[in-house]
Every structure is written in C-alpha cells, then in structure tokens.
Image (tube, rainbow, N blue to C red):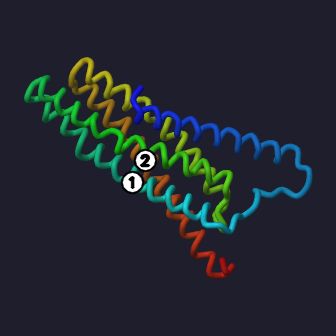
Amino acid sequence: MDPVNLAFLLMLVAFLLLTLTAAARDLRRRWSPVGPSHDGPQLTSSVPDLLLLLAVATAWYNVSSCWIGQLINYPLYADMSTYGPQAFLAFRRRYDSGLPIIMLPAALMCLAWGALLWLPCRNVPKRIVWTIVVFCVAFVAATIIPASTQVQMVREGFSNALETRLLWSNGIRAIILTIIGVLALSAVRRRWMNSDSTGA
C-alpha cells in the first residue's frame, strides 16, 4: 500500500476510534453519573483553538474541492469519453495522481473534529462538535459509493449510468460537507464572539 493511502486509512481509523471512545465515555457518564456531569477541562491553551482552526480550514477546503468535482471535474468525464476510451483513461490517471490533495485533507478534517471531542474548545458547545462528527461519519460512509463508481469506471470505461451514479452520490457528499462547513463557522463564531464577554 502506498504511503498516501496508508496515511489516509490511519487517520480515518484514528478518527473512528476517537469518536467511538468519546461516545462510550459520554454514554457511561450519562447512564452512571458519579457526581456532577462535566465535559472535561476547558483547556485555556492554544491546542484546542489550533485544532478548531485546522478543523474549520480543512472543512472549507473539502467543501470547495467536493463542489469543484461535482460541477467541473465529473461532468468532464462525458466530454473526455467522446475522444475514446484511451483519452478517458488518461484523464482518469491524471485525476488519480491528484487524489492525495483531496483525500488527506478530508481525513485530517475528520481527525481534527474527533480530537475536539477529547480537547474541548472554550465556548464551543459539545453538541455542535458531536453534530459535526456525526456528519463526518456520514461523509466517510457516503464516500463508498462514488469511490466504487470511479473504480468501476476505470475497469469498464465511461457510461452514462455510471456518470449519473457518480454525480448523485458525490452530490450527497457535497451537501454533507457544506453542512459541516456551516456548522464549523458557527463553532468558530461561538468560540471567539463569546470570548469577549468571558475574557478568554
């Protein structure tokens, strides 16, 4: 396995482990409270703030790259296929060579939001972080369809049916990422707009 795919898979596994263990922790606290419930220390260090900024930046990077794929790159498949299967496969190979620029920021986005479950950011409600994490899980799950469709296109060549499947499945991912992006902006607003009144 090449290093990029390995890094991508390791980041996704780390994200899922962070999410599952945080869910188990929160459920245990909910069902067997020992004292007053708390979400852990609200760290004053810059680590949660840097994580939040990284999460927001990668979220919006992914919003833009997914919509570029939806509105520009994937519709080009039909145009390239009119020049024959060799032209389409050459275009696909070039597209595949640029995948690390899309894959790694997506995994990094998920990992950053998962880490924020464990390193709470001052003034950012945990419910916002959990909502974003749930959408990140939905994004990862939704990626299976367009990824398998692209693999099928490489094996079998372009077809209108495969293009339709690619466009609607990637459209779902683009909508999920846009929701993540909007929620991420809400988290940033809460972090720094509320800090004026708290002196943070």
Helix, strand or loop under label 1 = helix
- Please determine whether, in this image, residue 130 is positioned above or below residue 77: below
Residue nearest the viewer, comparing 97 with 66: 97
Q: Give neighbour class at mark 1: few <14, some 14-19, many 20+ (Cα, 10 Å).
A: some
- Please determine whether, in this image, residue 153 is positioned above or below residue 138: above
Q: Furthest residue to the left?
A: 83
Q: Give the residue number, with chain letter if any, for mark 2.
A: 105
Q: Furthest residue to the top?
A: 156
Q: CA distance from mark 2 to mark 1?
A: 8 Å
Residue nearest the viewer, comparing 85 with 14: 14
7 left or right, relative to 156 = right
Residue nearest the viewer, comparing 78 with 28: 28
Residue at x 68%, y 68% (from the top left corner): 44
Residues at marks 2 and 1 touching, judged by CB atoms closer than 8 Å: yes
Which numbered marker is on residue 101?
A: none
Q: Quarter of the image holding residue 1?
A: top left
Percent x, y of residue 189:
54, 70
First of labels 2, 1 by sequence position? 1
Helix, strand or loop under label 2 = helix
Q: Nearer the viewer, mark 2 or mark 1?
A: 2
Percent x, y of residue 101:
34, 45
Residue at x 33%, y 30% (from the top left corner): 165
Say which quadrant the C terminus sits in. bottom right
Residue at x 48%, y 53% (from the top left corner): 179
Q: Give neighbour class at mark 2: few <14, some 14-19, many 20+ (Cα, 10 Å).
A: some
Amino acid type assigned to the residue bearing label 1 in the image: Tyr
Q: Give the residue number, with chain letter if any, for mark 1.
A: 61
Disc tally is 2
Amino acid type assigned to the residue bearing label 2 in the image: Pro
Residue at x 18%, y 26% (from the top left corner): 89
